[in-house]
Amino acid sequence: MPTHAITTKSARRLVSVDRFLTFIRVFLVTVIVVGFLAFIWQQFDADNPFAQWRNPGARGLTGDQFKGLLISGLSQGSMYGLIALGYSMVYGVLGFINFAHGEVFMVGAMTGFIASDKFQANGMWESNFLLCLALIIVMAVFFSTFTAVVMERVAYRPLRNSPRLIPLITSIGVSFFIQNFVLGLFGPATKSYPRLPEWLAKQRSILTFEIAGTRLLVLVVAAVSMAGLWYIVERTKTGKAMRAVAEDKEIASLMGIDVNRTIVTTFAVGGAMAGVGGILWGLMFRSVTHMTGFLPGVKAFTAAVVGGIGNLGGAMAGGISLGSAESIAPLVILEPLGVPGVSQLKDAVAFTVLVLVLLFKPSGLFGERLSSEDRA
Amino acid sequence: MSTLAAPMPSSALDQDWRKVLRWGFICGGALIALCLVGMPVELDRREIIERYLSLGYLSVVLVPLVIGWVSASQVVLEGFESRKQGLFDLVTGLVVGVIGGGLLSLLMVALDTWNLRDPLVNWSPKLFRFLTYENGMGFGAGAWIVTCGVLGLAGASLHVVPRFARRIVATVIIGLLSLSVLEAAVSDVSEGFGLEWLTDLIYAKKGGLTLTSAFVVGAVIAVVAALTDGRVKAVTNRYRDMEGIERQKTSMILFAVVAVLCIVLPMFLGKIMNELLANVGLFLLLALGLNIVVGLAGLLDLGYVAFFAVGGYTTAVLTSPNSPWFAPELHFGFSLFFVVIFAIIVGLVIGAPVIRMRGDYLAIVTLGFGEIIRLLFMSDWLGPYFGGAQGITNVPGVDLGFAMVKGTDPRSVFYLVLFFSVIAIYVSWRLQASRLGRAWMAIREDEQVAEAMGINTVSAKLMAFVVGAVLAAFSGAVLVAKVGSVFPTSFMILISIIILVVVIVGGMGNIAGVMVGSFVLIGVLGGPKQPGLLQEFQNFKLLIYGMLLVFMMLKRPEGLVPSARRSRELHQEEFLQDAWLRGDKPGIDDDDDAAPLLVGDGGGEEE
């Protein structure tokens, strides 16, 4: 324990920065609360002067609009969750942020495009959609896993024991390399996925929620893959090994676990999840370029941090909360404050969520399962 | 490992075939990837030696050479007797090359048989013609197998031939290549001095060296290299060992020479070269700032471009008559004052929340801030102040009274950039040795120990952010004055990463390293939008930057021109291990023994 004199001195020294941080915290909370209250007022009593204060003429959202936002947030968030799993797992095992994981996702989306494009050309896409879907998922998973494993072998394994920032910088380089390699291979044009068959893509009404078939498909596939992952990590021997390595590499190897193989498996599983995420992205937004991986990658990392990095359930929950926040917050908090063109600020909202979480609860919403020295 | 001798192969054919096969497949894979990315065909336009070697063929040819060299190298452990290299390694290189060439021939067959143009944009008859030298399949395949084999052999033989010969060959090749790469620069300079006949003599009309001039120049370089062998190193060593007044004097002379060069040379250069130099200077300014943040203080700031944007936008808003919100037009010099103030404010605002975070979180959060700032500048919300996606145009140049600095006159821009760069270099140099600079380095090495030693880590880190921010903001201000307009799209995250590559390749924490990095990377390959000397690389430079980043981190994390302290940090374990193997007690004569090893000289490792 530090002595009394030292504590007071360091406390005095840090006070100006802390005061500033408190100011930032209070400011952000005030903005959120005021925006939200104004929104509530707009919903219930649109003529109230407070509701009209910053944004006269606003009438709030209808129930259907709100439900639509929620659904789109959910489906996008489940995709972030799938990618975030890879970040979270690698972070849990190796303790570094694999910046290039977004590129693994992009490779999945790209593979899916190439395969589905070929399927559409020979007519199978329309006639036998479910088979095609299974095939493109398998292919995307294969290539994503391959990319992730090669990446680990070439770039990260030699750096296993180096200072923490070095693998991070390496992964930035890897990300850059993969992006531009794909650009070189497939060209800069935006690739668009073929349309989903009508019987699947049509609007459905479930529990009063109007939901497009595509989004439903995304949710179902994400849920299934999450369940599969949960089974692997919690119920199989490999998963046990993964958890052991995440806890302590040395002890795990003393217990007879092949640490190298386990790390490769971790990368492979994370890559597979990213591959599935890539396909879902392609089906939902129907366009892929070599830059597709960057923004979802950073946001998925945000999701992993929001949920508590190193925690798999947290990653999924973080993804869903981030997706919802991103689609709802601009309209619910910023619009009532009179900010024009809120949809442009969607990405900014996601990054603000990251800053908010790290300011208020650096261990994430659901805590983290890491030893204390790995804490942020 | 019970014996101290590595296992000896009984004959040259007693190879570790699995390893050889693996390297062969890596070689082939690299060749095929290179072809499919489209590099050779695109680079084929640029001639190195007229009609005999283009940059495209060179890029292909380098692969088996390098891989042959790597595959035949052996791990040398101190304290172990290493195997003498000879025929055995030559066989390795040869086989690796032949396998690589074989796989390339398979690609040719595939190119001829199938049409995969749909997903693979570079799957074209052009590539086929390139690979077969327009001489048909059989010739192409045979030629590539032989060439790759020979090159693999040559690569492997680098380990075998005596060091003297190796050095001369390397000098000749590098000299010829740089002469050819620098063609634009060389001809521009010689034109400035009225020496057009020299350029006409060396270079062919369509670009590239002529065959005769290549031979002549190569011979000259070889003779010079043979005569000066070892002396260059002796001179640099003598300079390093100088002390006190003598060293100061020599440094002053060197400084004066460089200063005169910097001031006089641009007068003889043409527009394109001056433009290039101005770009290099802009990035040098940015890299010097990032060097303080990343290199000295060890804070990986990926949103560094935010400060660049702040500098640019402040200047544009204050000086342009078109800025939507601020009507009066200030003078550039006066607006600089505000640039500094806003840079400090933004530096503090971004710095304060991230300052307590651990390294990797800090990186991602700063990246987030970089994006937030760009999105805010682009949004309709702040559009009334910053012009939104349309940006702010019609920014006047810098009126110095006796001269006008603007983009149409790159020379003046260069002098402006030079002025700021000198300030930045001076500031970084003085800061490096100051109390603050030592505090930064201590934080980089171990934050907790630094704090325990009484360093105020929070304020030191904030200072790093602020100083870096101000330098980047200067660069942004100059960029805007040069281009005459500012758009949010000029401030993509890409720029942060390119600057990071510059700093890392040059050498983190070392001013000279950063300068070398920006000259080599920005000057030769080019910045995000600015072309460099090798304009053909336009489409591949980001690929190369990514590769370089990975390569440097794996093989030489301290950079091309390392700072002594930084490399000691990175290789601490190796040094301790070597000392242990030699039987030294660690820590007793550390300084005498390890120091010469630690001071990297950029000359590479010699086994």
Image (cartoon, coloured by chain):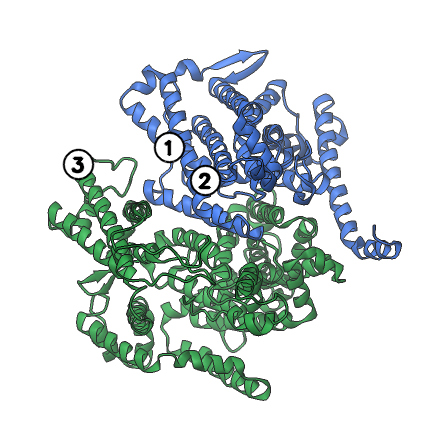
Chain colours: A blue, B green
Q: Is residue B45 visible?
A: no
- Near mark 1 (Cα within 10 A), the count class, few <14, some 14-19 or many ≥20, is many
- Which residue is depicted at the point 39% across and 81% down? B231
Query: Residue B530 location, x and y as percent?
Result: 41, 59
Marks 3 and 2, how far apart at CA: 31 Å
Q: What is the quadrant of residue A113 in the picture?
A: top left
Q: Amino acid at mark 3?
A: Thr
Q: Which residue is mark 1?
A: A111
Q: Position of residue B201 (x, y in %)?
A: 21, 76
Q: Which mark is residue B381?
A: none
Q: Amino acid at mark 2?
A: Glu
- Mark 3 highlights which residue? B113
Of all residues, the one furthest to the front in this rendering is: B2
Residue A103 marker: 2
Pointer 3 with pointer 2, Cβ within 8 A: no
Q: What residue is rendered at 65% in x and 35% in y? A: A308
Q: CA distance from mark 1 to mark 3?
A: 23 Å
